[in-house]
Amino acid sequence: MSTKSNQFAGIALITTLFFLWGFAHNLDPILIPHLKRSFTLSTMQATLVDSAVFIAYFLMAIPAGMIIKKWGYKGGIIFGLVVFAIGCYLFIPAANTQQYSFFLVALFIIACGLTTLETAANPYITVIGDPAGAATRLNFAQSFNGLANALAPIVGARLILAKGYTDEALNAMAPGARQIALASEASSVKAPYFILGTVLAVIAVCFYFVKMPVVYKQDAGDTVKSDGVFRALKHKHLSWAVAAQFFYVGAQVCVFSLFILYATQSAGISETDAAYYLSAAGFAFLVGRFLGTALMKFVSSDKLLSLYAAINVALCAAAVLNQGIITVYILIAICFFMSIMFPTIFALGVKDLKSDTEYGSSLIIMSIVGGAVIPRIFGYISDSTGDIRQGYWVPLVCFIVIVIFGLKGHKITRKAAANPSAAQIL
């Protein structure tokens, strides 16, 4: 197989990963209201779903970078797929035992697999072609993540939420019958996660047998080996990217994961209807990703990033100050303008890191722990005020940080050190 064919096959397979981890993440907004009701949780307790997922990013990001350093992109991807699949299969015993903590463990293991996949796939896309097109290439691949954003809520609503009982029906039941009904609801997650785990196992086999493109670091100026993971933070634009990604992911999780809870309380619609609106938000995210990728041919990625973030600051204020169905459309608009943020921050953060690229990728992926921390603050404000709309002050502050990154934080002020030889990393 030619080098060009290898590159096409590699990008095609990598793109499926963007879809799959997007699908897994966008089942979480379905799980949150589902498990909240099944286990009678507060909003803050329900956000432990996000905490379990994003704490894994914090703990697994550096080991993931080490795995990729040792085994290459292909080995890291196969490892991530296997761990991801194991976590999906664990949903079966979690549902059988009816333990909320077991669900959280399964989600943590899934996220360990996702961390490894994202640590490998994001830099792979940026280095496999022309460096000038890294942000555009990453945004294009992440567009399939946006497709998952649109499809996962529909699938989750039909396979998980639609099988649940209404609040009126549950309240009318005797305590014993109600417990049985809630147990039955919790079990509805088994089939979708079993199917997802099986798909992941098949794709892992495909990665094992398909010849992937070999990527070499051949930059003549790259003559010094990386000093280590935290030494990579000597690049100021990387440090800014880590902070920006922390706040961005926190904001995104607040919007997507708490979308259904927000919509049902602010607009007074049912959970199933809210899930369909969430699918519309995912579609807006997808359109925004494709449109943003196209716009980057005419507008620099940093300027587009700061513009979109500034618009979202205003939209978050509107989400706090309004009520009724208009607030749902405001959230959909926020999703549209969030669309380019993750890949653009990532691409700007790893730009010109050279021998520090793998560790820089690990640190940016590590910063995804913002998704564990910031929604907890959102939940605390919502519970303490009794008004979930007040939680939107939290993502508003997050988007202000991203505006600053887009305006000045992304600027490279120290050149990357370099590697003396062309090192094979696959």
Image: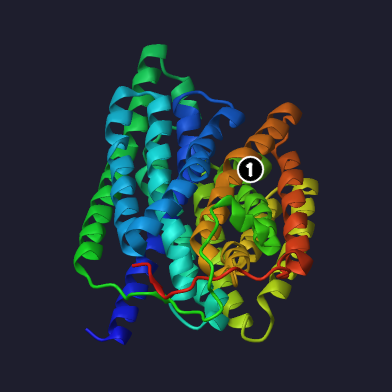
Q: Quadrant of residue 173?
A: top left
- Please tell me whether residue 222 is drawn above or below residue 3 in the rendered image: above
Q: Secondary structure at mark 1?
A: helix
How far from the left and from the top, in percent, is residue 216? 40, 75
Q: Quadrant of the C terminus?
A: bottom left
What's the residue at 50%, 23% (across, down)? 40
What's the residue at 20%, 59% (across, down)? 205
The amino acid type of the residue labelled 1 equals Tyr
How far from the left and from the top, in percent, is residue 380? 69, 31
Residue nearer the viewer, 149 or 69: 69
Residue nearer the viewer, 127 or 190: 127
The residue carrying pointer 1 sits among few (fewer than 14), some (14 to 19) or many (20 or more) residues within 10 Å by Cα, namely many
What's the residue at 46%, 50% (across, down)? 25
Residue nearer the viewer, 373 or 264: 373
Q: Quadrant of residue 203?
A: bottom left
- Please tell me whether residue 290 is drawn above or below residue 120 in the rendered image: below
Residue nearer the viewer, 323 or 141: 141
How far from the left and from the top, in percent, is residue 87? 33, 41
Residue 23: tell me if it is visible: no
- Please tell me whether residue 149 is drawn above or below residue 290 in the rendered image: above
Tag 1 residue: 262
Residue 164: tell me if it is visible: yes
For the image shown, how many numbered marks are present on the structure?
1
Viewed as shown, does residue 374 lie left or right of 130?
A: right
How far from the left and from the top, in percent, is residue 424? 36, 71
Q: Quadrant of the N terminus?
A: bottom left
Viewed as shown, does residue 331 lie left or right of 79?
A: right
Which scheme is used to colour this image of the protein?
A: rainbow
